[in-house]
Amino acid sequence: MARLIEVTDAEDPAVDDFRDLTTADRRPDRPGGRGLVIGEGRLVVERLLASPYPIRGLLGERKRINTLEPLLRDLDVPAYIVEPDTLAGIVGFHLNRGVLAVADRAPEPDPAELIRRSSKLAVLEGVVDHENLGAMFRNAAGLGLDGVLLGRGCSDPLYRRSVRVSMGHVLRVPFARLTDWPGDLERLGANGFRVAALAPRPDAVPVGRAGLSEGKVAVLMGSEGPGLSEEALRSSDLTVGIPMSREVDSLNVAASAAIVFHAMRSDS
């Protein structure tokens, strides 16, 4: 059973893993980053507890910790009990969700192995907005993708805001980073994937007629604004577009991802 420990002093070093989240919880490649995985709120914490990420501890109001009791029975970690004001003093803001958990990172899958065992993948280039990234992982989980490949210029999907926006589903969807861009895209073709680039181009095949539910498919998606690079577009087998109305040229990348991921389902 997790060890329940009351903390009354916001400066107690025992809760340093949770301290000043607005400044200290940064991507690992930024100065000062600790690289921890942080879940906020009961649902996200539950998914973190059920994930392969090694739990370091929990922090929250007593009533919030108590709701997690069935999941804490087999965990030998501290669960720090605090009052709301103490919680705010520790994390640096008032946390309406009332509970957090923190974990170490787990090893990421090898890209070649993730490709080998998958049939439907999302491949992202230059997606830097943490909220968009989190929403895309939630879409990928809900619509049955096997995984996500992160190409050049993508943000960290385990950044605190991405984990929160994904509702913890980023912890359930396998992802791997491609280090040779766009050369690594050749692995997809070698493993029988058809690579479809999502781009608002006049010659793009409408998503509903692109046959994305058939066979192995990887969909390339880029950032809002610049979109996919010409290198990535040249590495694809076809270009897919979402037909638009009323002089709107495109959708938010997370909304576009939901449409395309749905089209990739065999029951769509």
Image (cartoon, rainbow, N blue to C red):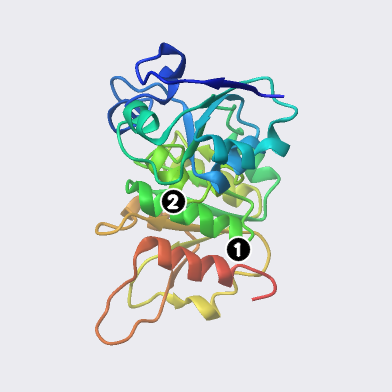
Pointer 2 with pointer 1, Cβ within 8 A: no
Instruction: Residue 43: give x, y in percent of width and height.
Output: 57, 48
The three-letter code of the residue at mark 1 reads: Leu
Whether residue 249 is visible here, answered yes or no, is yes
Q: Nearer the viewer, residue 225 or 181?
A: 225
Q: Is residue 149 above or below residue 136?
A: above
Q: Which residue is mark 1?
A: 143
Whether residue 126 is visible here, answered yes or no, is no
Q: Is residue 50 left or right of residue 220?
A: right
Q: Residue furthest right?
A: 74
- Give whichever of discs 2 and 1 has the lower sequence position: 1
Quadrant hosting residue 210: bottom right
Q: Residue furthest top?
A: 13
Q: Is residue 193 left or right of residue 41?
A: right
Could you say whether the residue bearing mark 2 is in a helix, strand or loop? helix
Which disc is residue 165 wearing?
A: 2
Q: Is residue 163 left or right of residue 47?
A: left
Q: Nearer the viewer, residue 110 or 67?
A: 67
**Residue depicted at 49% across the width and 31% down the height:** 37
Q: Is residue 8 above or below residue 69?
A: above
Report the mark closest to the observer, 2 or 1.
Answer: 2
The three-letter code of the residue at mark 2 reads: Val
Instruction: Residue 228: give x, y in percent of width and height.
Output: 34, 56
Q: Is residue 91 left or right of residue 47?
A: left
Could you say whether the residue bearing mark 1 is in a helix, strand or loop? loop
